[in-house]
Amino acid sequence: MSSSPSPLLTALAAQVMGGLIAGAAIQIIYPPLWTFPLAAALVQGACAALAGYKLESPSWWIPIHIAFTPLLLLGARLPIAPTWYLGAFALLLMIFWRTDQSRVPLYLSTQATAESIKGLLPPHPCSVIDLGCGNGQLLKRLALMRPDCTFRGIEHAPLTWLWARINTAGRTNVRIHLGNFWHTDLSPFETAYAFLSPVPMAKLWQKAQSEMRPGSRLISNSFAIPDTPPAEIVAVADRRRTQLYIYQTTAGE
């Protein structure tokens, strides 16, 4: 099975196509627009967004395409030293790390989600893992609600991992690790929680089925596993109208 192109390569292609389309359109329809660089940049952004849509980029790339060139133009006009741009890029990289490869943005779970997950945990002490724990706030809340359980979080972005470590400091039943959850053995856990994206869900289910004990649960926030009906769907009472998809493992494969 051939892999789909990197989102960054798709975004680059959309920007290039947007520039070519916008340049040709302006030159043919209204050349005086070149004297208004910001307006021309907005046209390029709109064309890049359209190209991104046609290339089936994730929906959250569309506003990025629209704003990229206009913001680049405005930023170039500001009296800001280049080192500040480098610092901002490094900061964003430390927070989001290689989202282009993982295709999993940074999502944060709500208090209402934590309360719903608490209701899904077994009454006896158990082990829970958060696959991509972000700032660790969900695990902190669950650790307070269920001090008899142990919670483990895996986060691959260095700054977000540090945030989670600080956020959960002092909680003896929470451990936060820096790393890739694909390299983490899920067999010790009765419950695995994930708030990822549609892209990795089928692969994650295969991992859970092959590693977790029969009867264990995989809880997915907002994103269903394709072609696999959940054992249960829990509607969370929050502003997002979050849905938790509950899957129960059957036997190791």
Image (cartoon, rainbow, N blue to C red):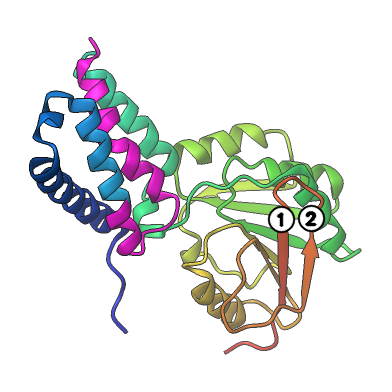
Answer whether residue 86 is magenta in the image: no
Provide residue 37's location: percent of width, then percent of height: 17, 26
Quarter of the rendering containing residue 191 = bottom right
Provide residue 173's location: percent of width, then percent of height: 75, 47
Q: Name, please, the residue furthest toward the top.
A: 79
Dot 2 and dot 1 residues touching (CB under 8 Å): yes
Left or right, 59 with respect to 83, comes to right
Main SS class of the magenta portion in the image: helix
Q: Total marks drawn?
A: 2
Left or right, 90 with respect to 145, comes to left
Residue displayed at 60% across by 65% down: 223
Residue 70 to residue 77: above or below? below
Sort mark 2 into few (<14), some (14-19) or many (20+) by Cα contacts within 10 Å. Answer: many
Viewer-side residue, 172 vs 246 = 246
Label 1: which secondary element: loop
Viewer-side residue, 163 vs 21 = 21
According to the picture, the residue beneath numbered tag 1 turns out to be: 242
Kind of residue sitting beneath label 1: Thr
Kind of residue sitting beneath label 2: Val
According to the picture, the residue beneath numbered tag 2 turns out to be: 236
Quarter of the rendering containing residue 195 = bottom right
Question: Which region is colored magenta?
Answer: 50-79
Q: Which circle's residue, 2 or 1, is located before the other in the chain?
A: 2
Residue 3 to residue 70: above or below? below
Q: Name, please, the residue furthest toward the right.
A: 123
Residue displayed at 16% across by 51% down: 21
Residue displayed at 83% across by 50% down: 115
Q: CA distance from mark 2 to mark 1?
A: 5 Å
Residue displayed at 27% across by 24% down: 85
